[in-house]
Amino acid sequence: MPQYGYSFEGFDPAVHVRASGREVNVSPKAAREIAVTIRGMSVSKAIEHLEQVAIKKMPIAFRRHKLKVGHRSELQGFPTGSYPVKAAKAYLDVLRNLEGNSEFKGLDPEKVKIIHAAGYAGRTIKDYYPRAYGRSSPNFHQLVHIEVVGKEV
């Protein structure tokens, strides 16, 4: 089992529970915005919210990456938002893993609150499209590391 580093400082195995998804092929911008949205929620509420995002019933507010993003009437405060379905499904997998890890540690999954969520850049997959006259154009894909840390309150 590989030992991954986490961006969360001060992890206490007796109190905290964590889960991660490494090198997930989703948008880094959507991963960052989802992390900001679910931080501070309980795990069950975050799962319900992301299930609504996955079926395009509830949007995610885009606070930083908001240029050329449409407004959504369901959002309050930040009007720009989108439905990042692929990233929401990736976060759902990690949150369900976090829920299982909390049960394994003897914590109550209904009382676990997300205190840290992050989506940051991982490895870059380099691909090239062949073009006319022997040239080629780059087509790079940025993979994402997803981290979620919870604490029973």
Image (spheres, rainbow, N blue to C red):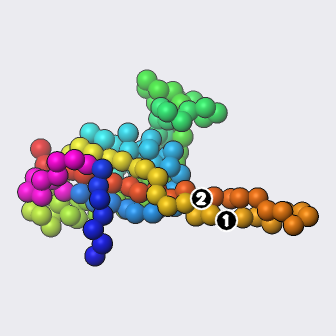
Name the element at disc 2.
strand
Residue 93 occupies which quadrant of the picture? bottom left
Q: Which residue is mark 1?
A: 127
The label on residue 141 is 2
Left or right: residue 125 compared with residue 15: right
Identify the image quadrant of the N terminus: bottom left
Left or right: residue 129 compared with residue 62: right
Amino acid, disc 2: His
Q: Residues within 10 Å of mark 2 (few under 14, many from 20)?
A: some
Please provide the residue range marked out in magenta: 8-17
Residue 33 occupies which quadrant of the picture? top left
**What is the distance, in whole Å, between disc 1 and disc 2 at their CAs?**
8 Å
Along the line of sight, the residue nearer the viewer: 145 or 76: 145
Q: Residue at x 53, y 51 (%)?
A: 27
Please, which residue is most extreme toward the top here?
A: 77
Vertical placement of residue 63 versus 151, above or below: above
Amino acid, disc 1: Asp
Vertical placement of residue 151 versus 70, above or below: below
Q: Badges 1 and 2: C-beta atoms under 8 Å apart?
A: yes
Name the element at disc 1.
strand
Query: Could you tell me if residue 43 is visible in this image?
Result: no
Residue 73: x and y in percent read 52, 29
| Residue 134 on the magenta span | no
Q: Residue at x 12, y 44 (%)?
A: 153
The label on residue 12 is none
Residue 86: x and y in percent read 51, 56
Query: What is the chief secondary structure element of the magenta stretch?
Result: loop
Q: Residues within 10 Å of mark 1 (few under 14, many from 20)?
A: few
| Dot placed on the residue nearer the N-terminal end, 1 or 2 | 1
Residue 104: x and y in percent read 15, 67
Q: Residue at x 36, y 47 (%)?
A: 118
